[in-house]
Image: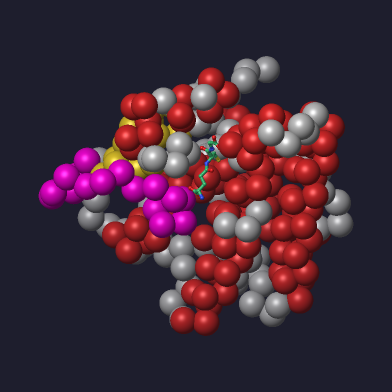
Amino acid sequence: MTQQPHNFELFSFWRSSATYRVRVGLNLKGLQPAEHYVNLDAGEQRSEAFLKINPLGAVPALINLGAEQSSVPLTQSLAILEFLEDTYPTPAMLPQDGLGRARVRSIAAMLAVDTHPLITPRVKKYLTTVGNFDEEAWRAWQINWFGTGLRALEQRLSNETETGTFCHGDMPTMADICLASIIVVMRTFKIEIVDIPTVQRIMANCEQIDAFAMADPGRQLGAPTG
Ligand SMILES: N[C@@H](CCC(=O)N[C@@H](CS)C(=O)NCC(=O)O)C(=O)O
């Protein structure tokens, strides 16, 4: 395979689920970005400098330094994965057929669009200030929304014949990246959802792949040691 230019800057945080998705995609495509650490615990995502990169105040953001014309920072992990897939088609993160692509995107959206946003720091900040949530109420909230997303996913994966070693057949796709992105962040919060055997089986298969293992939050700059 021809060596591809991979001149990227990734704005990231060690335990960020959305950044994990982009890290796995970059790893699968054999691309290594320079990383800029945005400390979400210190509120750096709301700094004037970072809001110029992503006005929503969220990581990841990816800058393509190799672009012929200067490009705006890419934001939104799913859009970034689609960009990587379009630009570096091999190995593929989407199946070739239209129905398969729609199924993979649908599973990815269940997790990245309908589950993950509910547990982000900005939601926690609102609920624990304006909403008067204490730590116990916040934890119950997290368990509720992780559980809702993962139980629905389990139902789909265990009933749909397209499920294989991975969410769709026997090659990892964007659906697996999103599944794993939820499980890894749940682990950092020490949250466990029971009775999701297909999800757990697929997660174990993902973890056998270097691209996923290397993206693990515990292996990133800034992760707590010990
Ligand atoms: N839909 C966005 C979500 C981005 C997002 O919410 N990222 C989190 C970290 S996983 C963040 O930076 N949150 C900052 C905050 O909520 O203040 C994506 O998939 O990229």
Which residue is located at x 24 percent, y 50 percent? 4
Please tell me how many numbered marks the rendered image carries. Answer: 0
Nearer the observer, 5 or 82: 82
39 versus 113 height, above or below: above
Q: Quadrant of the C terminus?
A: top right
Nearer the observer, 128 or 222: 128
State the colouring used for the structure image.
Answer: secondary structure
Q: Position of residue 75 (x, y in %)?
A: 39, 47
Which residue is located at x 57 percent, y 74 percent? 103
In this rendering, position of residue 19 left or right of residue 200: left
Instruction: Report the predominant secondary structure element of the magenta stretch.
Output: loop
In this rendering, position of residue 40 left or right of residue 186: left
Q: Position of residue 112 (x, y in %)?
A: 57, 55
Q: Position of residue 90 (x, y in %)?
A: 36, 62
28 versus 159 height, above or below: above
Q: Is residue 72 magenta?
A: yes
Is residue 69 at least partly visible in the picture?
yes
Which residue is located at x 34 percent, y 48 percent? 74
113 versus 214 height, above or below: below
Q: Residue furthest left?
A: 68
In this rendering, position of residue 210 left or right of residue 179: left
Q: Is residue 79 magenta?
A: yes
Q: Position of residue 144 (x, y in %)?
A: 80, 49
**Which segment did they paint magenta?**
65-80
Is residue 190 at least partly visible in the picture?
no
Q: Residue furthest front?
A: 130
